[in-house]
Amino acid sequence: MDVVNIGFVGTGGIARSHARGLSAVPQARIAAAADVSDAAVQDFAAANDVPRVYADYRHVLDNPAVDAVIICLPHALHAEAAIAAAQAGKHVLCEKPLAVSVAECDAVIGACHDANVNLMVGHTHRFIHEHTRAVELMAAGAIGQVLHIHDSIIGATRHKDLGWRGVPALAGGGVFMDNGVHSADRLRWWVGSEVTAITATVGHYGARTEGEDHGVAHLAFANGVTATMEISLIAPPPLGRCRAVVTGADGAMEIATWRHLKVATADAEEWETHTFPQNRSQFAREDGEFVASILENRQPLVSGEDGKRAVAIVQGIYAASESGQRVCLPAD
Ligand SMILES: NC(=O)c1ccc[n+]([C@@H]2O[C@H](COP(=O)([O-])OP(=O)(O)OC[C@H]3O[C@@H](n4cnc5c(N)ncnc54)[C@H](O)[C@@H]3O)[C@@H](O)[C@H]2O)c1
C-alpha cells in the first residue's frame, strides 16, 4: 500500500479541518464520506472532491476502497462507530474524546486490537508547535524540575446555542468532556506521568447547556507534579482562551496556545518569547501521523490508551465533584 484511502464518518466542523489537513498529506485520498445531514455531506464532497457519499456511515465501512476512517461524530456515537469500523477492518482515527466512559474506551481498544487495525485519538494539541517546543524545552531542563502547571481552556460561549454539545446524553458531559479532555491529555503529555488523585468542583453558571459550564480540578501526578485545570464556557476571553503556566524549580513557562510560548529562567528580568506560524497546520501533522503509522505498519503517536486515560481523568473529575471526595486513579 502506498496510498491510504480515507472515509469520513461525520462531515461537520472538525471534518473540514481534517480534510484541509489531509490535503497536505500526499499519501492520503478522501475516498468516501457519510453524514445524516445531506447538506453537510454534499458540501463536504463538493469542497473536497469526494467520489462516494452516503447518509449511513455503515456504507463507508462496507466500501472496500476505504482503508481507514476519521470519526467526527458527537461524542456518544464514537464507540459504536469505532467498533464497527474496526470490525470492518478499517484503521481508526477517532476524534476526542475516544468515548464517553472508560468501559466504552476499553471496548474500542479491544475491537481495534482484535481486528489488528491502528487506533489513534484526535488529541490535536500534541501537534501544535508551541506545545511540542515546550516539551522539548522542559526535557532539556530549561526551567528545571517541573513543580506545577495551571492549565485553562476558556470557550467564552455563554450565549451560544451549543447544539448536541449542550446535551449530556450526546456529549457525555459538559465542557470538561469536550474541552477538559484536551487539558487532561496535554497535562499527561507535558508532565510525563499519570494522574493518581483528583479533587474538583464543577457546576453550571448560565451557559446554554444542560452540562457543566465551568469548573476547577486539582490533579496530583505519580511523579509528584501537581496541576490545576480551569475549564469554562463563561469566563471572559482576556483571561486567556487556552493558556498554561508552568512553574519550574529554575524558571517558568507560559504556553499560550495559538499565540506564543514564553520562557523565563529563575533570575531572568523578562520573558523570552517564541512565536510560531499560526495556520492550523496541526491537523496536517496529526493526519500525516495517522497515515504514516498505517503505511509504516506501526502504532500511531496518540494511542487508544492515551484516549482512555484522558477520559478516565474527566470521569474522575465528575466523580470528585459529585462526591466532594478525593478520587484516586491507578498510576500504571
Ligand atoms: N480536536 C479538536 O480540536 C476538535 C475541535 C472541534 C471538534 N472536535 C471533535 O470532533 C467531533 C465532532 O465535532 P464537530 O465540531 O465537527 O461537530 P459538528 O456538529 O460540526 O459535526 C458533527 C456531524 O456529525 C453528523 N452526525 C450526527 N450523527 C450522525 C450519524 N449517526 N451518522 C453520521 N453523521 C452523523 C452531524 O450531522 C454533523 O454534521 C467531536 O468529537 C468533537 O469533540 C475536535
Image (tube, rainbow, N blue to C red):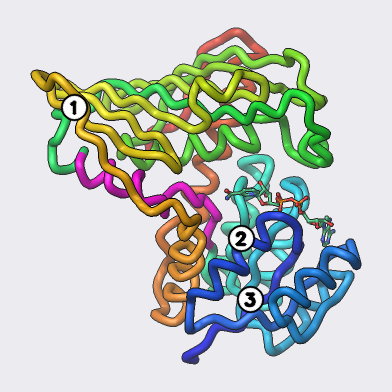
- Dot 2 or dot 1: first in sequence order is 2
| Residue 303 visible from this viewpoint | no
Count of residue discs: 3
Query: What main secondary structure does the magenta stretch of the protein show?
Result: helix
**Rendering coords of residue 286 (x, y %):** 47, 62
Q: Do residues under tags 2 and 1 come within 8 Å of each other at their CB atoms? A: no
The quadrant holding residue 140 is top left
Mark linked to residue 264: 1
- Dot 3 or dot 1: first in sequence order is 3
Mark 3 is on which residue type? Lys
Q: Residue furthest bottom?
A: 1
Please state which of the two labelled residues, at mark 3 or mark 1, is closer to the viewer: 1
- The CB of the residue at mark 2 lies under 8 Å from ligand 1: yes
Q: Nearer the viewer, residue 42 or 32?
A: 42
**Rendering coords of residue 199 (x, y %):** 51, 14
Q: Which residue, given by chain and number where applicable, does mark 2 sit on? A: 17
